[in-house]
Amino acid sequence: MERQRLNAQALAPYADHVLADAFIPELPNFYRGKVRDNYDLAHGERVLIATDRVSAFDRNLAAIPFKGRVLTEIARFWFEATGDLCPNHVRADPDPNVMIVERLEMAPVEIVVRDYLAGTTNTSILTMYRSGARRMYGLAFPDGMRANEKLPQTILTPTTKAGHGAHDAPLGADEILDLGLLTPRQWEDVSQKALALFARGREIAAARGLILADTKYEFGFNAEGHLILADEIHTPDSSRFWLAETYEARLAAGAAPDSLDKDFIRNWVAARCDPYRDAIPEIPQNVVLEAAATYLRIFETITGRDFVLPAPGETPLERIRANLAHLFAR
């Protein structure tokens, strides 16, 4: 199917082609995350299965067809493109939705790197700036900045790593060290690698007509204490991508940038309720399919590959079970 035909209408037959959960009883040590279902194997390995759940505002909002597959395949692309900058946790790729990874001791902070005054969540610098804050994450911001304006320099805005249902909280570098969350040497290593990864991502995105506005990284430490890039990298769930060709005109008009990420869903929800306090309204099928088309578009834009739709009747969980059957006895 041609790229331009992967729109909401073309995806209508796949409205029920979703992986809302990936519980496989034959696999050991199940743990459900916000988006991924995880299994801990012997010999220090973990199975990460990306479901189609979309999480924002510390809540699950919907299930988007093909989202988990898109996240996994985009993350694979970026892990390969950045392997010279930082080792990552990937050990095997048995299925389009699955990675087998090295089990790590995860750092207790998430690292968000930002180039623009943007965001919709309570920990985003735009939300905080609009509320009157001018000192955030240990950094000073001038008056008079516009929403989605480029920052004077790339910044790090770490947060606590909250569990499911809890809220992340902003951290400054001094707080990270004072609380003993990371040692000075670990913080220096994390900071340098996060900025290098972001610079690589920004460069590759620009070559594809995209602006990488911000992104989240998660790091862990292996048994030898080495820093390892974990979770995902530069996906539509962990990053904010804008179309470069329309950015300046939309900024001048005071309009939000054209985005290719989960802001499509976040913005729809935020326009209809306070997502931190109110019940989330049911998201209509046409909005879900538009979100699916957005995920497929960014997959094709970043990777340069066509997204091949599955044969009618394929069930994602059945395919995953077949591809992981060799692990059932382990």
Image: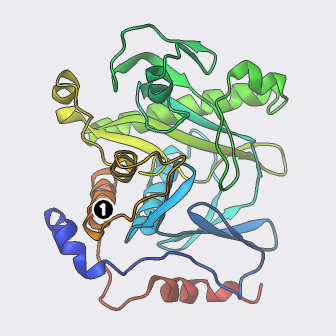
| Category of crowding for the residue at label 1, using alpha-carbon neighbours closer than 10 angstroms: few (below 14), some (14–19), many (at least 20) | many
Disc tally is: 1
Above/below status of 27 relative to 150: below
Q: Position of residue 83 (x, y in %)?
A: 55, 46
Query: What residue do we see at 80% from left, 24% from top?
Result: 177
Left or right of residue 127: residue 94:
right
Visible in this render: residue 277? Answer: yes
- Which quarter of the figure is the C terminus placed in? bottom right
- Image quadrant assignment for residue 314: bottom left
Left or right of residue 70: residue 224:
right
Q: Position of residue 311 (x, y in %)?
A: 30, 87
The residue that label 1 is drawn on is 296
Query: What residue do we see at 63% from left, 31% from top?
Result: 158
Left or right of residue 5: residue 158:
right
Visible in this render: residue 184? Answer: no
Query: What residue do we see at 29% from left, 43% from top?
Result: 259
Considering every residue shown, the one lying at the far front of the view is: 278
In the rendered structure, which amino acid carries the disc numbered 1? Leu
Q: Position of residue 292 (x, y in %)?
A: 32, 64
> Which is nearer the eye, 202 or 14?
14
Above/below status of 71 relative to 1: above
Q: Position of residue 117 (x, y in %)?
A: 41, 24
- Image quadrant assignment for residue 175: top right
Query: What residue do we see at 61% from left, 41% from top?
Result: 86
Above/below status of 257 relative to 314: above
Left or right of residue 327: residue 263:
left
